Amino acid sequence: MTATVTLPAVLHCRLAALRRRIRLLGASRGFARSIVVLVLSAGALIGLDCWLDLPSTTRQMLFWIWLGESAILSLISVGLPLCRRIDVRDIAAAVEAKYPDLGERLTSAVELAEGSEPGHGSPLLIGLLLEEAAQRSQTLDFQPAIPRRRAAMAGVLA
């Protein structure tokens, strides 16, 4: 017997919030890294100009190259994390790594709900698993499962 399975709305919203957090932390980390690279490359170009006393056309050419570098770097380091596909199963696994007392209920619920095939087994048992996963995770804070330390360190460095 097969049954279509949907993730409870509470869990879906909380996992979607973690997906947004992952994207924003990746974009902020990429922004901070691009700031560091652009400041260092601008400093190197200014130092090169002071050392060699470059003609103005060469300075202008280096400026436009640096500007193009900044546009490409910003697009890659900020744009890609915002558009990256993030699997909900990976998010559920990260939450369960933080809270092992969930006993893989969250991962199982997500896999049943996100699978391309309908859930196999008793619809009542599957429904109980989904409800138990929602109930056990109701009081848990999912935010610490995705730490922001790396993004914060990159921001401090920038």
Image (cartoon, rainbow, N blue to C red):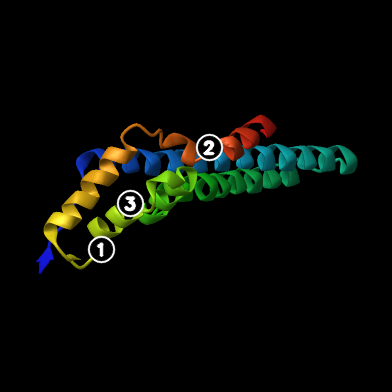
The number of callouts visible is: 3
User: Distance between the Cα atoms at labels 1 and 2?
Assistant: 31 Å
The x, y position of residue 129, in whole percent, is 24, 51
In the image, what residue occupies the spot 23% across and 49% down?
A: 130
Image vertical order of residue 62 relative to residue 142, above or below: below
**Mark 3 element type:** helix
Whichever of labels 2 and 3 marks the residue nearer the N terminus, that label is: 2
**Crowd tier of the residue under label 2, counting other residues whose Cα lies within 10 Å: few below 14, some 14–19, many 20 or above:** many
Tag 1: amino acid: Gly
The answer to whether residue 146 is seen in the rendering is yes
- In this view, the residue in front, 10 or 97, is 97
The x, y position of residue 51, in whole percent, is 89, 41
Tag 3: amino acid: Arg
Residue position marked by numbered label 3 in the rendering? 105
**Mark 2 element type:** helix
Mark 1 or 2: in front is 1
**Crowd tier of the residue under label 1, counting other residues whose Cα lies within 10 Å: few below 14, some 14–19, many 20 or above:** few
In the image, what residue occupies the spot 74% across and 40% down?
A: 40
Whichever of labels 1 and 2 marks the residue nearer the N terminus, that label is: 2
The answer to whether residue 13 is seen in the rendering is no
The x, y position of residue 93, in whole percent, is 42, 52
Residue position marked by numbered label 1 in the rendering? 115
Q: Which mark is residue 28?
A: 2
Q: Could you say which quadrant of the image residue 15 lies in?
A: top left
Whichever of labels 3 and 1 marks the residue nearer the N terminus, that label is: 3
Tag 2: amino acid: Ser
Image vertical order of residue 24 relative to residue 126, above or below: above
Q: Could you say which quadrant of the image residue 29 lies in?
A: top right
Mark 3 or 1: in front is 3
